[in-house]
Image: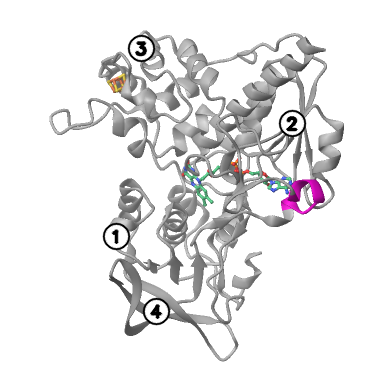
Amino acid sequence: MIDALNHLPRPRAGADQLAEAFSDLAPPLTARQAAVESARCLYCYDAPCVNACPSEIDIPSFIHRISDENLQGAAERILSANILGGSCARVCPTEILCQQACVRNNAQECAPVLIGQLQRYALDHADFTEHPFQRSPASGKRIAVVGAGPAGLSCAHRLAMHGHDVVIFEAREKAGGLNEYGIARYKLVDDYAQREVEFLLGIGGIEIRHGQRLGGNLSLAELHGQYDAVFLGLGLGAVRQLGLADEDAPGLLAATDYIRELRQADDLAQLPLADRCLVLGAGNTAIDMAVQMSRLGARDVNLVYRRGEADMGATGHEQEIAKHNQVRLHTWARPDAVLLDDAGRVRGMRFARTQLIDGRLGDTGETFELAADAIFKAIGQRFDEQGLGDPLAAQLARDGERIQVDAHMRTSIPGIYAGGDCTALGQDLTVQAVQHGKLAAEAIHAQLMLNVEAA
Ligand SMILES: Cc1cc2nc3c(=O)[nH]c(=O)nc-3n(C[C@H](O)[C@H](O)[C@H](O)COP(=O)(O)OP(=O)(O)OC[C@H]3O[C@@H](n4cnc5c(N)ncnc54)[C@H](O)[C@@H]3O)c2cc1C
Ligand code: SF4
């Protein structure tokens, strides 16, 4: 996929330097730090941090256990609500979720309780000799899950706990979804995504079949006919287009394509390096792309956004990370034309300056150019229509381009459920996808048991 950049040089830094640049962004707490931090929790009644956690983890309860040096108990508390609590502890934007809501998050207290770091501490130090959850007696029911991302994995685990057998159909070689292929490399280090998948599968009763693509070698009608229920956790597999001429020129590609290669690379020194690069967008994917290119050794990394700083999708914390990594931000500018060199490769981009006119975004009439060896599009993900190409799938009601679901993750077709980024419910976050998967599993279980009673 990144063949489009093959003409570019490789990083100048050696393997050790690159490994250091991509090491853990937020190093784990020491035992002393965890003891001090857990003692700061006030164990609030009706705790606002819990209300702010999309996966409803009982935060004061697990922090209390850490304070009592019961790490096993703390870990079980977290995992009972969120089986991917380990990756969520590393990737959750806690600054806009639990930690923002923490009562200690005020000027007098200086900082909220470090809930994410404590969650990681508990899960890293719990020592499970066997999987912490037991399966209920076998129900004889089989459920198909499409997509082994956070939503699909969470759904599968909860269904397996209830005694059902689950087959996960996954298009890619590895399970984990964007935990494996999308999250910035310095947020999930040491193959954490795969280690977490292995842990989750330890419950038993879950089979993953790779190379199985819904809308390709798999149809929804087939799954619907063969299984007692179907869960769709397809994510958002397509990338938004700029709509400009020469968008496919060598040197211009989707940020997610480059990040996928970077995440899978055994040797970072072999990746193409865009010494002068432009990243288009202002969400977390744009920041991740810009920061990772900067850490690979790029000298001039520019993030360009069509609106102002206040409208950026990336959290304040992510924006700070960008600043610390020498990423330059240009606001109020939209892509106007791709500039090519004589060989037809990207040499830069022309931008039109923008402004708000009666609340609507318009051009000022002024343009400017920025030179670049590569341009990365991070202007949003789209639902991949190919996944729902077969006649039954085409009947699923939509919410915009995404799959419509109710509060129990039921789609418009009985027996078919969906969750995670492919639905419009909630935010596009790992923790949200985990919660959707869990809710869908509970709804599927309730429906199947109702059917058994009625029979
Ligand atoms: C670059 C990037 C960085 C991000 N960083 C963060 C972050 O730091 N923190 C955070 O909370 N969130 C982050 N997110 C968002 C988060 O990764 C997603 O919200 C989350 O992964 C959604 O989980 P999901 O299971 O719905 O989808 P995905 O993780 O996308 O998983 C979908 C799975 O379905 C498979 N699949 C898709 N189509 C088919 C098909 N037709 N047939 C079979 N299988 C199929 C895919 O291969 C994949 O394994 C980031 C997203 C991106 C793009
Ligand atoms: S809001 Fe803060 S202090 Fe209160 S229970 Fe949650 S983490 Fe502890």
Query: Label 2 belongs to which residue?
Result: 415
Q: How many marks?
A: 4
Dividing the image into 4 quarters, which one contains the N terminus? bottom right
Q: Which residue is mark 1?
A: 309
303 left or right, relative to 323:
right
Q: The residue under label 3 is which amino acid type?
A: His
Residue 375 visible from this viewpoint: yes
The residue labelled by disc 3 is 64
Q: Is the residue marked by circle 3 packed among few (<14), some (14-19), or many (20+) residues within 10 Å?
A: some
Q: Which residue is mark 4?
A: 351
Q: Position of residue 338 (x, y in %)?
A: 50, 81
Is there a contact, CB below 8 Å, between mark 4 and mark 2? no
Depth check, mark 2 against mark 1: the one in front is 2
* The C terminus sits in image quarter: top right
Element type where label 3 sits in the image:
helix
Magenta run includes residue 389: yes
Quadrant of the image occupied by residue 225: top right
